[in-house]
Amino acid sequence: MNPFDVTKAVDYSDQELFYNWVDFPKHSFQNFIRPTLEMPMLIVGSKGSGKTHIMKHFSYSMQKIRSNNTFDNILKEGYIGVYLRCSGLNGYRFLGRNETEETWNSVFAYYLDLWLSQLFLDVIDNIFVINKGLQKLEGIVCEKVLNLFSTSKEKIIDIRGLIDFLKLQQKNIDHAINNISLSSKNLSQSVEILSNPGDLIFEIPNIITSTVPELTNIKILFLLDEYENFSSGQQKYFNTLIRERRNPVCFKIGARRYGLKTTETLSADEHIKAGSEYELFDLDNIFRENYVEYREFLRNISIKRIANSQIRISTDISKYFNQSNLDSDFEIIKGKRLHIDKFITKLKKYKVKNVNEIVKNVGCENVLIERLNIYIIYRSIKKGENLIEISSLLKECSQQYISGHNVKMYDVILDKFKQDLIDALYRENGLKLTSYCGFDNLVKISNGIPRHFLMIMKHIFRWNTFYENDFASNTVSTEIQLLAIKDTVLWFMEDANKTDENTNYRYSIESICNFLRELRFSDLPPECSISTFEIRNVDFNPGLKRIITFLEQYSYIIKEDYGRRDKNSNVRNDMYQINGLLACWWELSISRRGIVKLSSDKLENIFYYNRAEELKIMMAKELLKYNVPFRKENTVLELFD
Amino acid sequence: MAEENIDKYYYKLKIFSETVWEHKISKNKIDIWLSNFKEEERENLLFLLTQFIYFSKLQIDNMLISIYRDFYKYVIVENYRLSNNNTTDIVSIKNHFKESERKSRFIPIGNPSESSSSLLGEFRKINNIRKDLFIERSELLNFTLGDIEHFIFIDDICGSGHQAYHENQAYISHIRTKFPNSKIHYYSLVGLEEGLEFLNGNNQYDFLESVLRLDKTYKCFSSESRIFKNNEDNIKQDDLKQICESYGLQLYESIVIRQGGNPYYAAPHKLGYNDSQLLIGFHHNTPDNTLPIIWYNEDMITWNPIFPRANKVY
């Protein structure tokens, strides 16, 4: 069995969720989420960041499991969690069909009140079952709750009956909506709203906690997951509840990045404000800013899942993953020396004199130094220096370096470009880049999105089976890790298959990655460790903004929090790093060091699929600057003929 | 070997293995199989392996259901209704079918150690048929009892049709003599059209069907072979055929020699029994109609099969 087969919390049963729960090291999710906090909280995070797992952890069904079904232990937590997936409401039903927005909003508000109240009463019913002594209070609770309904003459004596009553109201609404096209009545005639908006959500918990002495100080925590599935109008209603929250009710709202479509409320169209009316908890940021804890978190998840699958491993999980072996790979490269062939071809193509002597001088038994010497020769070509002299100097430097001396010129370049030169060596010699392998790098690649890591692990286990490789007794080869990354990239890119009249997101992703890769593997790259680009004033360009928002929303690019200031204008620019999975696929860096500055024009050429021709010309011009013979722009055709 | 193609083929094979091939192969098993061949031949063979058609237990179980239900039961029911004014009387239909079933005998093709025999065990279980309605083929010659109306031969594959024809001849003569009013059926999971036509032409069986009929496009090296249609990888049919023939001949020769025959007679079988040229395998076994390089599992020549055939040399 593959311990990583399940990568979505919704696919787990409550028992499995509990069984596979891993807390965030050091800080604990409890400290971030603070379930009894009165101020509502919006939990945002990318797809796969673990929002559902975290929110479900605070739900009553999980409280019950971890409290061994003991009422007193549940009470010790100080709250009762009521979990709802917003997608379950099919919010899109409450739209159109010749009904006014106002009517729909009223019906939706009532429907949501009924739904949440049912979920809450289900929990209460269960509590009354666990603690039979409380059942004597059911009659009083029912009487008080029924008073919230304007015209009800029902005689209900227990919670179950109350739930059935709410269910019936909800069913009536479903019936009216489903038959709206067939009925001669409009919605306002066929649906009767029996309570004030929000009354059920706030007052039923109030009735319960004031009637049941054991629950007096208990908070009722509504956990609304997948808030992005509500339309703006629907969010507007719930935003109003957030604004007008009353004790003992607390809210935690889970949403994707950009899932909060509006901050408007129904209170004279006022907005809810982060910090004063709700607290914003950005899960991605927590994971990205606390790398050590995030790494530990993924390690613990892995160990737990593997152990739950009856596979015995040690807690030092890193040792199960092979890393790049430079020594053996350099030996292979030495045997091939294709980087030298490429170098010779290039020099000859541009009619450099004394090629044989230059090549002889740059040669070194250490292939990294040999490639570094080539880099320096390229730099000298750009500067117009005497290549024979430089190569002779490099010959001496190489000898010094080999004999153990420090060579300052080398140190300066290697400090910045070492990984780029290593990757170039691999690439030029037809080897796959293995610098992405190893547990720490896989963590890095996931960019703070646990599901990306879990997907890689899932595919590692699949490939391990195909390779008949036992995880516990053998390390995972770099080959398997790269295959697993490839599978994960294919899965990740599925969301990008979205197009509209002017946009093809997959094209935009491929295009920016191709562009950055060409820069990274040019003869003299403009920056080291390329994978990040910077863009100015993107807010003024709606077309670009839409694409960037989509790419960021799905984490194809990761926005760096503070951007950086333009040296000349002092304007703060936006900075985006290519997602780690994409970086591996396109052989970009997974570290963020060098930043490629792009103007709106350039980025438009890259992102807009109807500008492929312009992009070709732009790339050719751009690469002229970084490739031998480093000619001016007007020689484009000569270089690419 | 073109790296990209190799990666692509392994990738495909991994997906096949973890989905429809019941984890029957692994990277190691593929590499061991490839070690039978020369380095320069391996890309071709890897491509060939991606074209292999495997019938899993689930598929075979459903095919066995189909044989019993569609070829046997429904035909009996249909005939009964036709001769009874399209009756819908479920009780009389059920009684008639029960009676017909009692007067039926299901017989595997081949001897008890062969794959059709174990297949028939599955056939019985999955269709919930009484044990006493099954007999071994060898028992047929002594079988004279009862008022049997249907003799149903079940086979996994009908390739050229020659085995089903020649090997059954004596048994069928016996049935025709002893049970002149009975009907003789032959049903297979998979049948090559040419084999089914051959059997049909010989009128040996009253009823003849195959769940899956394979036309010439399933023959690896026929001019219409589906394997090489839309072949983007520039794999040459002639090259691959030559490789399969040269190894296949050696392998089949060893079988013929072991059976005491003249190696000369191996030539027609170098691409599978009687030039079947198939590339298929079943959960329970790989038929000899498939290319021998896939299944050869004898000890006369050191060979690592990828889908081994249960040893058949007696």
Image: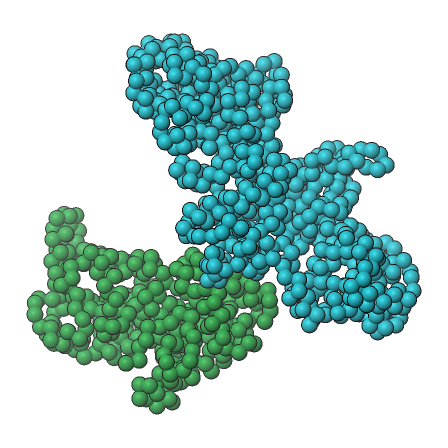
Chain colours: A cyan, B green
The reply to whether residue A612 is in sight is no
Residue B273 relative to residue B150: left or right: right
Q: Identify which residue is drawn at 13% across, 66% down.
A: B149
Q: Quadrant of residue A130?
A: top left
The reply to whether residue B18 is in sight is yes
Q: Identify which residue is drawn at 70% across, 70% down.
A: A334
Viewer-closest of A22 and A222? A22
Q: Identify which residue is drawn at 50% across, 34% down.
A: A54
Viewer-closest of A124 and B40? A124
Q: Position of residue B255 (x, y in %)?
A: 35, 83
Q: Identify which residue is drawn at 50% across, 22% down.
A: A36
Residue A621 relative to residue A470: left or right: right
Residue A109 relative to residue A366: left or right: left
Q: Quadrant of residue B53?
A: bottom left
In the picture shown, does residue A365 fall above or below A192? Answer: below
Quarter of the image with the N terminus of chain B in it:
bottom right
Quarter of the image with the C terminus of chain B in it:
bottom left
Q: How many marks?
A: 0
Q: Position of residue B163 (x, y in %)?
A: 28, 77
In the picture shown, does residue A228 fall above or below A406? Answer: above
Viewer-closest of A14 and A94? A14
In the picture shown, does residue A24 fall above or below A272? Answer: below
